[in-house]
Amino acid sequence: MEPSAALPRPRRSPAWLPQALAYTLSVVCMAWVLSRYSFSNLKGDLQTLDWRWALLAALTELAIYVCQAWRWNTLLNPVVRLGFWRTVQAIYIGLFANEVLPLKIGEPIRCYLLAHWNNFRISLGFASAAVERLVDGFWMLLALLITAAFVTLPEDLTILVRILEGILVLGTAALFWILHHHQDNRAVLEQSRWAATLRHVVEGLHLMGNWRTLLKTSLISLLMAVLQIVPTYALIKADNMDLSFFAAAAISTIIRLATFIPGAPSNLGVLNVACVAALVLFDVEKDVAKSFSIIMLGILTLPLLIGGAVATALTGVNIGELRDRAHHSIRGSS
């Protein structure tokens, strides 16, 4: 009997393709923002900008991620006691990576760092990050539904909201099933292609998954969601636009939704288009909205670059090395 021929491996997409798509989208978006735009408008806006409000926007942007460290420590508290400022450092290094590298590579980097510094599996870090995203998605969806009740959203955005609803429902159902069927999970994961990695993630969810911890995490996430409105509102005041805090909440939520998917560094282009589209919903002139989007990108990105660069320098390792170590750690855990 002849040995059966080995099955051909499925063709994998080139490693450069996601990055190429992200940069292409960024270039297209920035080309749209800058088309028929005069930089004299930006110069005039910068001259009249109220820098006290701009400073408040920058400081609040920094504070949001200190709050995220509090949330991350709270979520992992049933499993491991973390040093608060070490968690802050990991988050800022991840943010720095997101500002200079594509595809939100900072997420695996921050999970790797916290696991490495505290001697636990990186899969536990991924499990905690997944819970964070799920809770963030819930509050973002609620904010979008409230926004849709007062503002007519574009049809494309409405479709995205429905997709997000479906993802959240499935994700929440999966989380509840995992927390209530520990033994069943083992039986399912033993037959999975990614059994080792998924098993570690599921075990991490079980370790974190008491209801008191999840409730505290959700409340801190609500505080973060409110804080994320403040930089947008402060920049609106700095730019002397007559928009309410509610309008700022809607604009901030639309931008967050548009930049949820990994893209180019700093969400360049995508953030600008989302900002312009959101401001136009509130009858802001397109050129004014374009200037505001560029100001927002600069003022909210610069503090994260500085804070992240300092946090990275304290490790004595450059961001490229940290990325490689994170990738190696991920491959080693699977």
Image (cartoon, grey):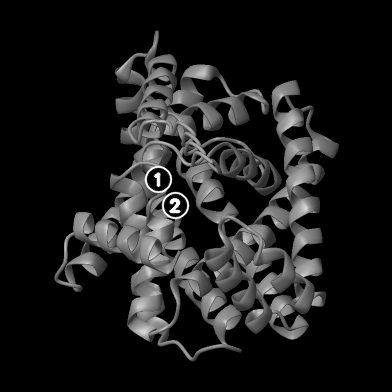
Q: Is residue 67 visible?
A: no
What secondary structure is found at the residue carrying circle 1?
A: loop
Q: Residue at x 30, y 50 (%)?
A: 302
Q: Which disc number belongs to residue 246?
A: none
* Residue 162 x %, y %: 79, 36
Amino acid type at image mark 1: Asp
* Residue 55 x %, y %: 38, 56
In-image side of 321 versus 60 (left or right): left
What secondary structure is found at the residue carrying circle 2?
A: helix
Q: Is residue 50 visible?
A: yes
Tally of numbered tags = 2
Q: Residue furthest right?
A: 149
Amino acid type at image mark 2: Trp
Q: Relative to 196, is 161 above or below?
A: above
Tell which of 286 and 50 is nearer to you: 286
* Residue 189 x %, y %: 66, 65
Q: Residue at x 73, y 46 (%)?
A: 167
Image quadrant assignment for residue 96: bottom left
Q: Which disc number belongs to residue 53?
A: 2
Q: Relative to 287, is 163 above or below?
A: below
- CA–CA distance in space, label 1 to label 2: 6 Å
In-image side of 118 versus 142 (left or right): left
